[in-house]
Image (tube, helix red, strand yellow):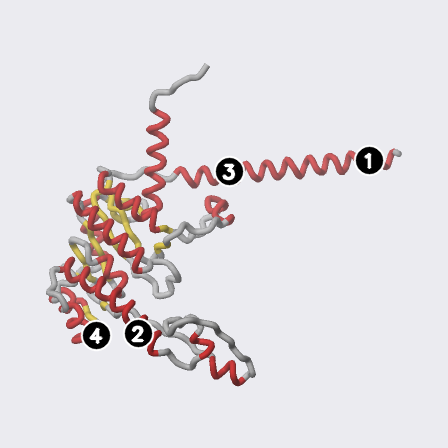
């Protein structure tokens, strides 16, 4: 009996200890998360930075539990941005006295997955055009822009071109693998039921090349996309219709000098020179040795904090 009570109370106190340890750990995580969410005050005269290197996704990312520990270490966390956040930030910045303009930078990665689609970039571009109605400037800095990145950056009032910049303005392209011969070699048969000729989803399994119908529909789709991109860029840069494609065909990769002469950019200038110029114009962030700036995510977080402060400072109603 004595050994029974000894085992019982030993297990009982061990469970209490483990529960207490879990509660303490959970409380520590909450404290660290709260500390990481406090953020810094947004200085007046800042530029909203739109970094195109971060893929702009149509939907918010899935929850990642590792983000809860972001405030407990110094590791650099991958910043994610959604299309909704970008549109909200740009619209809010147009009427925010602390934001003096927008600075577009970064190159859209080729391996962006489903992010930064032309449909999403079109909405971002239209939001920036609407932002310009506030008479605040939009700047962009280009190093090695591809077509999708320049499609957005072309709306800027001033386009700074790096001295070593190369514009790679290619049209949309498509490629596919075909497995019919490989499947036949291994004795694998594919049975397909389809109605009509314009049903190309199964073609990789029943053909060794693209069908004329598939090529036709893809060419029409890409022609519409390219027409929209080309027309938008030409209108923003004050170019004659069709001149952009002529410029690309004549030069291939466009260097900084040709870009300026062709009105694709406004000035050849290095990033360090831009930094110095903006420090004088918009103030210096001495902590990060740059000009006063804020990212899309950081800006929206500051907006939420300000809204909470405003709500807490107002009149309160007591219910008895």
Query: Whole-Å distance between the Cαs marked 3 and 1?
Result: 36 Å
Residue ID for mark 3: 30
Residue at mark 4: 252
Marked residue nearer the N-terminal end (2 or 1):
1
Q: Are marks 2 and 1 in contact (CB under 8 Å)?
A: no
Which is nearer the N-term, disc 4 or disc 2? 2
Give the crowd class for mark 3: few <14, some 14-19, many >=20 residues within 10 Å: some
On the image, numbered disc 2 is attached to which residue? 216
- Of tags 2 and 1, the one toward the viewer is 2
Q: Is residue 30 visible?
A: yes
The part of the image, by quadrant, that contains residue 263 is bottom left
Asked whether disc 3 touches disc 1, contact meaning CB atoms under 8 Å apart, the reply is no
- Cα–Cα span, label 2 and label 1: 82 Å
Residue 235 image offset from top left, x and y in percent: 14, 59
Which dot, 4 or 2, sits closer to the camera?
A: 2
SS state under label 3: helix
Residue that mark 1 sits on: 6
Q: Is residue 222 above or below residue 310?
A: below
């Amino acid at each position: 009996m004595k050994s029974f009570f000894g085992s019982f109370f030993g297990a009982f106190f061990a469970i209490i200890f483990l529960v207490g340890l879990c509660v303490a750990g959970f409380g520590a995580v909450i404290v660290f998360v709260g500390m990481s969410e406090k953020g810094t005050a947004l200085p007046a005269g800042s530029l909203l930075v739109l970094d195109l290197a971060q893929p702009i996704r149509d939907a918010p990312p899935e929850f990642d539990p590792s983000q809860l520990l972001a405030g407990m270490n110094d590791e650099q966390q991958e910043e994610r941005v959604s299309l909704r956040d970008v549109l909200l930030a740009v619209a809010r910045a147009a009427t925010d006295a602390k934001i003096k303009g927008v600075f577009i930078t970064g190159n859209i990665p080729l391996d962006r997955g489903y992010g930064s689609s032309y449909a999403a970039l079109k909405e971002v571009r239209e939001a920036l055009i609407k932002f310009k109605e506030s008479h605040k400037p939009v700047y962009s800095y280009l190093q090695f822009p591809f077509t999708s990145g320049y499609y957005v950056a072309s709306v800027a009032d001033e386009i700074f071109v790096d001295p070593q910049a190369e514009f790679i303005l290619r049209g949309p392209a498509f490629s596919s693998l075909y497995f019919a011969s490989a499947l036949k070699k291994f004795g694998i048969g594919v049975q397909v039921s389809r109605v009509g000729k314009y049903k190309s989803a199964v073609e990789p399994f029943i053909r060794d090349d693209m069908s004329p119908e598939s090529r036709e529909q893809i060419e029409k789709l890409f022609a519409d996309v390219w027409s929209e991109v080309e027309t938008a860029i030409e209108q923003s840069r004050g170019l004659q219709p069709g001149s952009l494609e002529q410029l690309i065909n004549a030069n291939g990769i466009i260097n900084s000098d040709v870009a300026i002469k062709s009105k694709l950019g406004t000035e050849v200038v290095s990033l360090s020179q831009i930094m110095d110029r903006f420090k004088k114009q918009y103030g210096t962030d001495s902590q990060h040795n740059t000009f006063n700036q804020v990212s899309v995510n950081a800006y929206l977080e500051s907006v939420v904090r300000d809204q909470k402060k405003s709500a807490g400072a107002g009149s309160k109603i007591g219910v008895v």
